[in-house]
């Protein structure tokens, strides 16, 4: 069901229900008021006839015992029957509209009676030894009641139909901005990432378009990042591939030590390309939000020991592990795979840039009650302050070497993904990177 139809059905049903209840209440009240007015007319006519009879001279009875007066003499409105009788039941006067049979007048007040197959509503008033009875036919009352109720119901029906029509056009007009947004999106090309420009949007839909435009901006940044990654990867992989091909050609054309040296260089180039591809794959997985939560948990000391074991498998400067007092034994709040990968990249980067004969320092220190800091310090040439913003750029290198230029980019991506903090400290005799991670709550506390 469309949104427009859903709104119209919901609001229309509410309109019909409310109008029906209001109309039923009104018609019921009109009916009661009409019946009350007709009864009041009977009572008023009886009292008026009583007042006129006091002013008329004493009428003489005819042979039939009944004196028939004209309606004008009794002062009774047309359509009403009137009968004047004595307390003994003798009819003294009767209007022309009265039935031939005697109206029942034994009890004062209002009564419903059936005379000659016709239902009557009567009112009897007793005064000065006479009973004045006025009556009207109930079928005439019903006809009048239907006419009045019909006259009252028709405007209500037309008002309800008009409300539903106005509701239809109002909802359609109110949903027009959604149609504009849909049309704007449908007319865009598949690769368009330009923001939507729609004027005269209501305040409720402006955040929707703003959120959509923010999504387009994120998509644009992602596309640009992937394009740049593809271009940089193609450029970075072209050099080792060319070198491998050249060394293999040299090996095929030579023999002895020269051929073995060419094959060794080709193998080193393949290793470098393999490491670069692994780094690219890790970066893509981290930025692509692939899940790394395997259910394992470890402490900061476990992360440090595992990362040290990984880097010790390759030649390089030694790493000194130092832990300050107060290191928590609580589990870190980062998936172990990502924490180990980040620390391993920091250590490999430091070993690559520290001077020969110096050691890399890895320090674990608490940061408040809920965080721990991994500090990796080398004793290399350092990085100038103006280049600090470039260290996390992909494939950026501060010096010539066999690194891929992706290590710190991966650490930055992990920090952004896991809400960690990454700080760079440029020292006079080296460079230091602080990687701060959060700790999981201590469920055994208290």
Image (tube, helix red, strand yellow):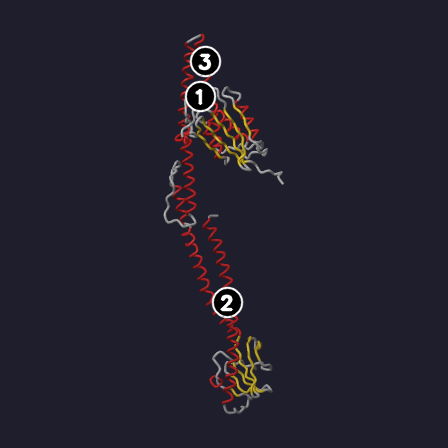
Residue 27 got which mark? 2
Label 1 belongs to which residue? Answer: 402
Label 1, label 3: how far apart the Cα atoms are: 18 Å
Query: In the image shown, does 425 or 93 lie closer to the viewer?
Result: 425
Label 1, label 2: how far apart the Cα atoms are: 94 Å
Image coordinates for residue 103, horizontal then vertical, percent? 56, 81
Residue 343 got which mark? none
Q: Quadrant of residue 399?
A: top left
Which corner quadrant holds the C terminus?
top right
Label 3 belongs to which residue? Answer: 263
Q: Residue at x 43, y 40 (%)?
A: 215
Element at label 3: helix
Judge whether 365 appears above or below 183 on screen: above
Element at label 2: helix
Q: Residues within 10 Å of mark 3 (few under 14, many from 20)?
A: some
Work out whether mark 1 precedes mark 3 in sequence or the reverse, and give the earlier one.
3
Q: Residues within 10 Å of mark 2 (few under 14, many from 20)?
A: some
Q: Quadrant of residue 443?
A: top right
Work out whether mark 1 precedes mark 2 in sequence or the reverse, and give the earlier one.
2
Image coordinates for residue 328, horizontal then vertical, percent? 58, 34
Query: In the image shown, does 180 or 304 lie closer to the viewer?
Result: 304
Image coordinates for residue 19, horizontal then vertical, percent? 49, 61
């Amino acid at each position: 069901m469309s949104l427009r139809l859903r709104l119209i059905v919901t609001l229309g049903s509410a309109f019909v229900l409310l109008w029906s209840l209001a109309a039923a209440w009104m018609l019921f009240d009109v009916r009661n008021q009409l019946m009350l007015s007709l009864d009041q007319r009977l009572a008023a006519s009886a009292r008026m006839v009583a007042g006129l009879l006091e002013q008329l001279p004493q009428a003489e009875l005819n042979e039939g015992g009944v004196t028939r007066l004209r309606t004008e003499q009794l002062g009774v409105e047309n359509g009403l029957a009137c009968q004047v009788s004595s307390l003994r039941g003798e009819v003294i006067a009767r209007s022309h509209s009265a039935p031939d049979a005697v109206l029942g007048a034994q009890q004062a007040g209002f009564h419903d009676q059936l005379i000659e197959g016709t239902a009557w509503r009567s009112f009897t008033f007793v005064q000065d030894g006479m009973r004045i009875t006025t009556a009207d036919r109930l079928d005439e009352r019903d006809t009048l009641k239907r006419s009045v109720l019909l006259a009252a119901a028709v405007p209500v029906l037309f008002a309800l139909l008009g409300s539903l029509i106005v509701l239809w056009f109002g909802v359609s007009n109110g949903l027009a901005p959604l149609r504009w947004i849909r049309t704007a999106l449908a007319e865009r090309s598949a690769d368009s990432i330009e923001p939507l420009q729609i004027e005269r949007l209501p305040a409720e839909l402006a955040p929707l378009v703003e959120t959509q435009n923010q999504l387009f901006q994120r998509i644009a940044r992602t596309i640009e990042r992937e394009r740049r990654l593809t271009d940089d990867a193609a450029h970075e992989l072209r050099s080792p591939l060319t070198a491998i091909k050249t060394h293999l050609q040299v090996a095929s054309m030579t023999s002895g030590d020269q051929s073995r040296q060419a094959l060794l260089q080709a193998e080193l180039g393949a290793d470098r390309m393999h490491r670069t591809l692994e780094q690219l794959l890790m970066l893509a997985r981290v930025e692509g939000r692939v899940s790394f939560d395997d259910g394992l948990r470890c402490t900061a000391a476990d992360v440090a020991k595992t990362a040290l074991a990984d880097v010790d498998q390759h030649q390089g400067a030694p790493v000194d592990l130092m832990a300050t007092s107060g290191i928590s034994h609580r589990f870190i709040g980062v998936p172990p795979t990502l924490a180990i990968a980040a620390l391993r990249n920091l250590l490999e980067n430091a070993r690559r840039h520290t001077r020969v004969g110096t050691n890399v320092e890895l320090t674990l220190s608490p940061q408040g009650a809920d965080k721990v800091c991994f500090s990796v310090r080398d004793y290399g040439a350092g990085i100038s302050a103006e280049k600090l913003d470039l260290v996390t750029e992909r494939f950026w290198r501060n010096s010539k070497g066999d690194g891929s230029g992706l290590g710190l980019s991966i650490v930055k991506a992990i920090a952004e993904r896991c809400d960690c903090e990454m700080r760079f400290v440029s020292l006079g005799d080296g460079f230091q990177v602080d990687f701060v991670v959060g700790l999981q709550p201590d469920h055994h506390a208290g």
